[in-house]
Image: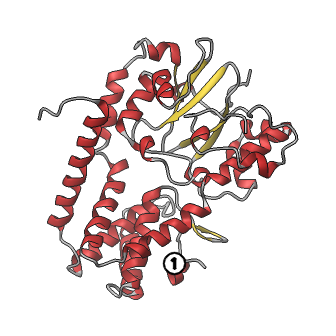
């Protein structure tokens, strides 16, 4: 059983699957309403303002969409999920590295040359046969971008943001991951201050694979907790 | 090659050895929009630097010390103001576009939640 990272407060630890699945999580609907309100709030307003401006400029042919795409792609590829995948693969091979990653992921990422976590903390949580971790941002779309690249569309969607808390097992089932009743589901709510990386379980049949070969097996969604990894 | 040119050398720009760094996807999009406007000759590098500098100084004058943390908030404000002043867009255009995006997002959400849209 993995211990919990020391720098995570109870407030961040939202729910266990059994509570959430039965609808007993305190303030479940309030949280949803708050998420709704926050869409009008400052956090996501910057993203909305950017989308509006880019849409207007593009429609008027004032900027070349190809230029926009090239710039965004460049940074997306620089920070894509391969960065997180490398950390995960190494954590499977090196017990000491894994311990440090779980203890202080932000420091490990910094030491590995990953930048972009200025002002935000980073916490790694490990899946085990007993515990499955799922990451969400109920308020907007906070995401460990420097490790995983751009968040997938579903991560930003309100349906996921609300349901990941209320019914994580149902959400995971729709993603194709059926968990045994005995597996505890932990849902982690990202904020501007704290981002989460899920370390998926090492898939079976991967003994003897190199770090590179293992990293190639690690998917973006598995590092959000939205899927498990199958044998190669 | 890094596609951002001189823009990546602006003072205070959050960056590492390889170039600018972004905390959120919209930071990259706002950054790219300025690159695009300069490439297309709609604004000059000097106009942009001056405008961004003015917004950063305003923040400083308000007593904001951590310019790095809110850098792209100010970047976006500067970009909106410059685009409006140069009549590339207008406040009404932007407000209408925001409303449209919100509405579209709302409809998509309703669809995904499987609810009827009754208002």
B41 w.r.t. A101: above or below: below
Given residues A199 and B49, the one toward you in this image is: A199
- Name the residue furthest front: A232
Determine the image quadrant of residue A228. Answer: top right
The location of residue B110, given as percent across then percent down, is 25, 35
Residue B14 in view, yes or no: no
x and y, in percent, of residue B70 in the image: 45, 59
Q: Give x and y (percent) for residue B44.
A: 37, 87
Residue A175, image x and y in percent?
50, 32
Query: How many numbered markers are drawn?
Result: 1
User: Quick one: quadrant of the N terminus of chain A?
Assistant: top right
The answer to which of A1 and A176 lies nearer the viewer is: A176
The residue beneath circle 1 is: B4
Q: Please give the name of the residue rendered at 32% of the width and 32% of the height, measured from the top-left corner.
A: A34
Q: Residue at x 42, y 59 (%)?
A: B26
- The one nearer the camera, B101 or B49, is B101
Q: Let me know if residue A170 appears in the view.
A: yes
Q: In the displayed orientation, state which residue is furthest to the left.
A: B119
Q: Secondary structure at mark 1?
A: loop
| Up/down of A179 relative to B79, above or below | above
> Is A183 on the left-hand or right-hand side of B27?
right
Label 1 packing within 10 angstroms: few (<14), some (14-19), many (20+) = many
Task: Report the quarter where the C terminus of chain A lies.
Answer: top right
């Amino acid at each position: 059983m993995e211990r919990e990272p020391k720098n995570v407060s109870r407030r961040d630890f939202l729910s266990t699957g059994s509570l959430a699945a039965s609808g007993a999580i305190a303030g479940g609907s309030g949280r949803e309403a708050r998420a709704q309100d926050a869409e009008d709030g400052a956090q996501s307003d910057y993203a909305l303002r950017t989308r509006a401006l880019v849409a207007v400029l593009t429609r008027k042919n004032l900027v070349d969409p190809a230029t926009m795409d090239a710039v965004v792609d460049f940074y997306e590829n620089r920070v894509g999920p391969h960065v997180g995948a490398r950390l995960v693969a190494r954590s499977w091979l090196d017990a000491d590295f894994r311990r440090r990653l779980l203890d202080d992921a932000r420091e490990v990422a910094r030491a590995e040359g990953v930048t972009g976590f200025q002002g935000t903390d980073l916490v790694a949580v490990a899946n085990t046969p007993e515990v499955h971790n799922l990451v969400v941002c109920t308020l907007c779309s906070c995401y460990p971008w420097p490790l995983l690249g751009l968040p997938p569309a579903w991560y930003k969607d309100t349906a996921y943001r609300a349901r990941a808390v209320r019914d994580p097992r149902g959400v995971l089932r729709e993603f194709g991951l059926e968990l045994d009743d005995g597996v505890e589901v932990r849902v982690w709510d990202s904020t501007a201050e704290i981002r989460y990386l899920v370390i998926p379980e090492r898939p079976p049949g991967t003994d003897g694979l190199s770090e590179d070969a293992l990293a190639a097996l690690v998917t973006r969604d598995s590092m959000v907790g939205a899927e498990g990894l199958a044998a190669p | 090659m890094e596609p951002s040119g001189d823009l990546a050398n602006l003072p205070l720009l959050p960056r590492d050895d390889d170039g600018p760094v972004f905390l959120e996807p919209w930071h990259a999009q706002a950054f790219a929009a300025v690159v695009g406007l300069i490439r297309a000759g709609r604004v000059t590098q000097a106009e942009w630097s001056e405008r961004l500098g003015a917004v950063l100084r305003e923040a400083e004058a308000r007593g904001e010390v951590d310019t790095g943390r809110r850098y792209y908030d100010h970047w976006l404000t500067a970009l909106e103001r410059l685009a409006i002043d140069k009549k590339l867009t207008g406040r009404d255009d932007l407000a209408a576009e925001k409303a449209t995006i919100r509405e579209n997002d709302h409809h998509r959400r309703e669809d995904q939640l499987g609810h009827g849209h009754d208002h």
